[in-house]
Image: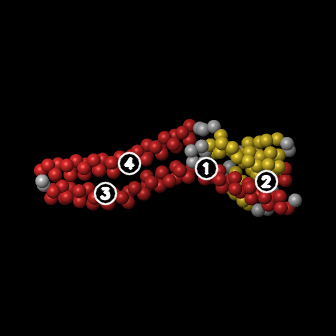
Amino acid sequence: MTLYYRDDAVQVTSEAIHAGGHVVALADVTYVWHARGATTLAVRGRVLGRGVLVLLLSLPPLVALVCVLSLAWAAQDRGDWKLALVIVAAFVMVGLALTPFLEVPLGWLDRSYERGNRVHELWVQHHGREELLLRTPDALRFGQIYRAVQRAVEQQGDRR
């Protein structure tokens, strides 16, 4: 028996697919497909959180740009460029010092995109019936499971 995928809720082997309390023998599977399911509250929350995070990451550079432009405007009026350059240099140094701290929120943003923004469903046809085996909002996990099912079904077809 070959194990193609396993986590706490799904197991795909060369003999069967175990998902959500269902066990489907691969010999009985005639067709496998995926569909887009109805959006859940978790997915909407993820998309909203992603938007808030992008907004929060975008605001500090925009505020800094407005401050630098107003500083340049004031320096031009007064003819005092030395103070303006010192303040701009301080902004740059603080910005460079804070850059490593962007790793955490950018990591959150990256994982948010990996998980996707829709619900994915895995369907199989066996014994003349269509059955929903898996429904998940995690795009990365769904892709791994779907590919494992495809490999298992392909290998089953090669044995026939």
- The residues tagged by marks 1 and 2 sit, at their Cα atoms, a distance apart of 22 Å
Q: Which residue is drawn at 33% across and 57% down?
A: 98
Q: Which residue is drawn at 13% across and 55% down?
A: 80
Q: Report helix, strand or loop for mark 2.
A: strand
Residue, disc 1: 139
Say if 111 sits above or below 49 in the image. below
Q: Report helix, strand or loop for mark 4.
A: helix
**Residue 65 screen position, x and y as percent:** 29, 50
Q: Report helix, strand or loop for mark 1.
A: helix
The label nearer to you, 2 versus 3, is 3
Q: Quadrant of the C terminus?
A: bottom right
Q: Is 83 or 4 nearer to us in this picture?
A: 83
Q: Residue at x 46, y 43 (%)?
A: 51
Q: In this view, does 21 lie to the left or right of 42?
A: right
Give whichever of discs 1 and 2 has the lower sequence position: 2
- The residues tagged by marks 1 and 3 sit, at their Cα atoms, a distance apart of 34 Å
Give whichever of discs 2 and 4 has the lower sequence position: 2
Residue 95 numbered mark, or none: 3
Residue, disc 4: 58
- Tell me the amino acid under the disc marked 4: Ser
**Residue 118 screen position, x and y as percent:** 60, 43
